[in-house]
Image: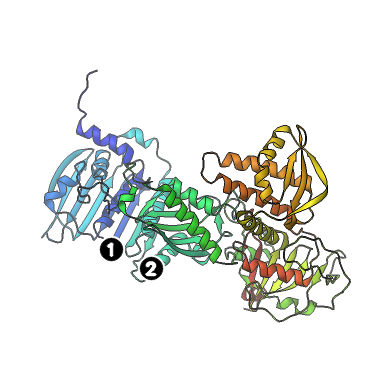
Amino acid sequence: MQIRQLPETMINQIAAGEVIDRPASVVKELVENAIDAGATRIEIVTAAGGLSLIRVSDNGRGIVEAELALAVARHCTSKLSDDIHDIRSLGFRGEALPSIGSVSRLSIRSRAASSGAAAEIRVDGGEISGPKPAAGGIGTLVEVRDLFFATPARLKFMKGERAETSAIVDVVKRIAVAFPHIRFTLACGDRTALDLAADTSDGGLLRRVGQVMGEDFVTNSIALDAAREGVRLSGHISVPSHSRANAMQQYAYVNGRPVRDRLISGAIRGAYMDTLPGDRHAVAALFLHLDPALVDVNVHPAKADVRFRDGGLVRGLFVGAIREALAGAGVRPATSGAAAMINAFRVGAPAYGHSGPAGGHRSYGTAQRASTAAMAGFHAPLDRAPQPAPTGAPGFAETPQGRLDVALDSADARASVAAEEPLPSQPLGAARAQVHANYIIAQTEDSLVIVDQHAAHERLVYEALKQAARERPVAAQMLLLPEIVDLPQEEAERLAAHAETLRRFGLGIERFGPGAVAVRETPALLGEVDVGRLVRDLADEIAEADAGAAGTGDGLLRRLDQIASTMACHGSVRAGRKLKPDEMNALLRQMEATPGSGTCNHGRPTYIELKLADIERLFGRR
């Protein structure tokens, strides 16, 4: 077959396959056009998931009649100068309207401020008619009917009406977050899906974020604002204990353009690496501002992907700014678990943790704080009998342990109760009791705090190990007799290959035959540990870290963090150990001084907080 020029209609249909893959793509292109036209009010109406009708009207600058024909012609745009690298608008390719017109029945009615009347042009499956005079106010109304009627095969790839409507709502939400000064309304069928009022005040952006992403995110968010080499990152991120089962609640913007970029999502995941479980994702609304010449938004016709000239700079800015914000937030739990915690105490409610957020995880974090007023009558004299305690726990004084066994309804129900002292001004208050030999009960001026002692101490040891290993080798303690640990040959070889790295953590190992290693030193910070179990777990962690870091530039840091995490788990104060009052308070004070202490290094919460008002409501006092 000889080479021939394709018809204009077929060219547009090919372009439509890239630009317009579903109704949500049409909505995205039309809304972006309205924003570029300077609109302050945008109304969207859809029917049948956008397949039968999409109508977008705005009060922007409008289009003069003489330019309507150019608006539906390919590669015609008013938004691009002679420099393709200087893109300061959402649209610029000049492909959307002709692509939409080639696969649907498209009509555009517009009136510019300088025109005395409106005009209308129609495109029916690529056939253009008009423009002709029409009635209309200043602005533009675009109506798309019977989407993909000209390419019926495409209809077979559409999902159900509900799924297509959901995709449209998501597109409008993502765009609306970046433009709080614009009012957005979206009506899907017979209901209004969105009605976001314009807000031009200083706090308008955060209020729009709350409208779109939920007020619980605003309550559990941390603000960040950082800059590096002319690139600025601002926005809000969630505290680690406020997470989701997927990354759909991560909103990222580059110069106001919503994007789904692997570099950005990977940077967010890396920044939360040791504060979230592997199957949980942070919530974020982040805005990157940089010179348009430093980012290429012309990578794909849909303009959802971008490429940065200096990807390392951008990734480093994201990781550094997020970690700094998390560290600066101090000790802080999430409030999203309040409803689940309170419901757990109601008669007939399901057990707490069985009806948590998406993904089957229980609702972590602050179930908003409650008072320990109900415990006021349960204090009793302390039994001062000395109790031995393990050594090596950072900050835990080795003094005789105060202890009180209080018999409740059950013979084996026991609690260690701390002496009453004035309440400190610190966020976690004063320790009052230890229950089930694992949970510390603390009291603040208006709340009750429940701390998982093992999870909390695990985070403290982890941070101490990380800091020590990066600044200087961790102090080691020599074993009286080397401990020989039998391993598969490949695991022994792997540990021997990382012997120098392990020595930075105070763990001295060497090969001992083909299938064993000899451990001569252990980290002094950990005290007494099960050496065999620690070494075997480290072999597994190093193998996983090496595989995950293949081809990345942060392999060493990731490996160090994995080693520190495993060691911290083995060196933490165990569940089941009775703590003295001064030990409990020392743990609380260290948590307050340690970044990220709201979660352990596996991403589990270290404490929850209940407000006095919530407890009073449970008892009908409010």
Of marks 1 and 2, the one in the foreground: 2
Q: Which one is in front, 152 or 569?
A: 569
Give the left or right position of residue 204, taking residue 245 as reference: left
Mark 2 crowd level (few <14, some 14–19, many ≥20, 10 Å Cα)? some
Q: CA distance from mark 1 to mark 2?
A: 14 Å
Residue 590 image position (x, y, % from top left): 67, 67
Q: Which one is in front, 35 or 614?
A: 35
Residue at (53, 58) in percent of width and height: 323
Residue 391 image position (x, y, % from top left): 80, 61
Where, quadrant-wise, is the C terminus in this rendering?
A: bottom right
Residue ID for mark 1? 40
The residue sitting at the bottom extreme is 422
Identify the secondary structure beneath mark 2.
Answer: helix
Query: From what the image shows, is residue 50 above or below residue 613?
Result: above
**Amino acid type assigned to the residue bearing label 1 in the image:** Thr
Residue ID for mark 2? 204
Residue 415 image position (x, y, % from top left): 81, 68
Residue at (15, 45) in percent of width and height: 69
The residue sitting at the top extreme is 1
**Amino acid type assigned to the residue bearing label 2 in the image:** Gly
